[in-house]
Amino acid sequence: MDIEQTLKDIKLLKKEPLCFTFDYALHEKISAHYYNPAVIDIIRKLESSPAKLPLNSIKKEIISGPWGFQLHITEYVPEYLPGSVWLLQISNLGEFGNIIKTKRNKFISKEKNEELRSSRVRKGDIIIAKTGAINRCALIEDEVNANLNQALGIIRLKKEYNQIRIIPKFIHEFLNSKYGVLQLMRIGGYRAGQSGLSLEEIGSIILLLPTEKEQLKILDETKQLKEIAGRNLKDYRKKINEIKEIVPKKLKIKLSDEPKKEEIFSCNFLDGLKNRIDCYSHSTYCQDIVKKLKKSQEIKLINGRDLDIIEDRIGRKELEEIKAQEFKYIEVKHTTELGTIKGCKEDILFNLPTRARQIIKTNDILLPRPIGSTEQIAIVPEKYNGQLCSTGFVVIRPENYDNAILLWCILKSDLVQKQLFYLQSGSVQPEITPTNFKEKVFIPIPKEEIQKEIIKKTREKTEQAKYFLEEYKNNRQKAKQVFLDMVLKS
């Protein structure tokens, strides 16, 4: 069974109604998703195995991250502060079960870490999302100086159960398999508000625990496929970086290293409070990028305002006329760093959020506004022509597909991405505003002969990146299937 298809089927229950009964005495959930036959079938398979047991049986403890009142945004500190401690967030749980660093990493002081000592991370811990992306968990394989925020929890395992050694990597693999993910989604993935799990619900997940010998054998069988997948992923990331370097190399513009710690800037208060006084807007590094662009003889330098930026919104009158139609709806989470769109929502207009207000056309460029997502720029393919996107994008309309490819590559380069970062605004949800993009971002447009070279190179590198990404997914999926097949036979 394909997990992505199963999850899609669960979401589409409204089109294929499901009848179910429940027992009040057992405090069962009144939820069609909870009774989805595909998930029930998995649980029956697990319960028929002699190796079955609830997670509660093998956990030493399940720990929650700090409550909201225990940790405030004002208590974050710079990474370079002596003794700073990495504060893990949902964004640090990699899609593939690993801990990753992001551009929005948060840190707390060693004193705050001591105050929150119950949620300090140890080697062997399994970090699980309690809210939001509850289908993700990550294994701490090495010692790391880290703590959690309130959206995460820790599954800390016993050393053994009934004289069977418990291998954290094996349990982590099980939780990240479709047998684990679908159980988590069944319990907490379809709540009226945000998805969420209590510590008790996490502990109720049914697992299979074969002998230590079998655990090691299963992990060993999947190791080779994972190593191949790891090389595929490394090659993919290399190609993504090569795409970002195409424009700077063709224009022969080399950026200096960013300041690691601090910069000194001056601010004139004589003009009142019209000017921003944050360190990003006064960054000398951002100013240095613009100076280098202005010096180049190989480009025409334009502002965002020189592009055809679409800011039309659907009004009330249009809503009345088209509200019974179904639209594909694209949010920032649906765009990828390869310029594609995946997993977008399709629904009747009046069921969509209020931010679904921009109609897009073929070859439009969707530039995500939130900082941390600005590299996930997408080019709209034909099948999304006339559909809707979130107001969380700056929508640019090039003349044709070649122009879209060219602009996509330019926007992905650090010549522009660094400007977007330093021109961000907002302290809670930093983003690049349409106004800042139009007025303050400088975009290098190369000479025509260089444009053709950039377009050709971009297409080549993009196809190579897609190949490695597909190979990675295939080998990763094979590893997961081998894991499940062997677990059920153990």
Image (cartoon, grey):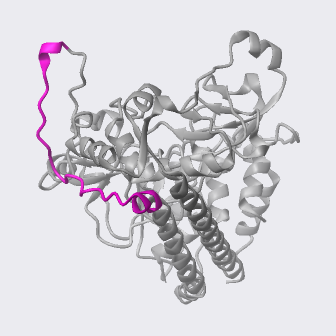
Q: Residue furthest top?
A: 317
Q: Quadrant of residue 102?
A: bottom left
- Report the predominant secondary structure element of the magenta stretch: loop
Give x and y (percent) for residue 74.
23, 34
Q: Quadrant of residue 302?
A: top left
In the image, residue 153 sits, relative to residue 468, either above or below, namely above
Give x and y (percent) for residue 22.
78, 41
Give x and y (percent) for residue 361.
72, 35
Q: Which residues are magenta?
A: 245-272
Residue at x 27%, y 44% (from the top left corner) = 291
In the image, residue 463 sits, relative to residue 307, either above or below, namely below
Residue at x 25%, y 49% (from the top left corner) = 107
Nearest the viewer among 181 and 355 is 355
In the image, residue 321 sits, relative to residue 84, either above or below, namely above
Residue 304 falls left or right of residue 361: left
Does residue 37 appear in the picture of this structure? yes
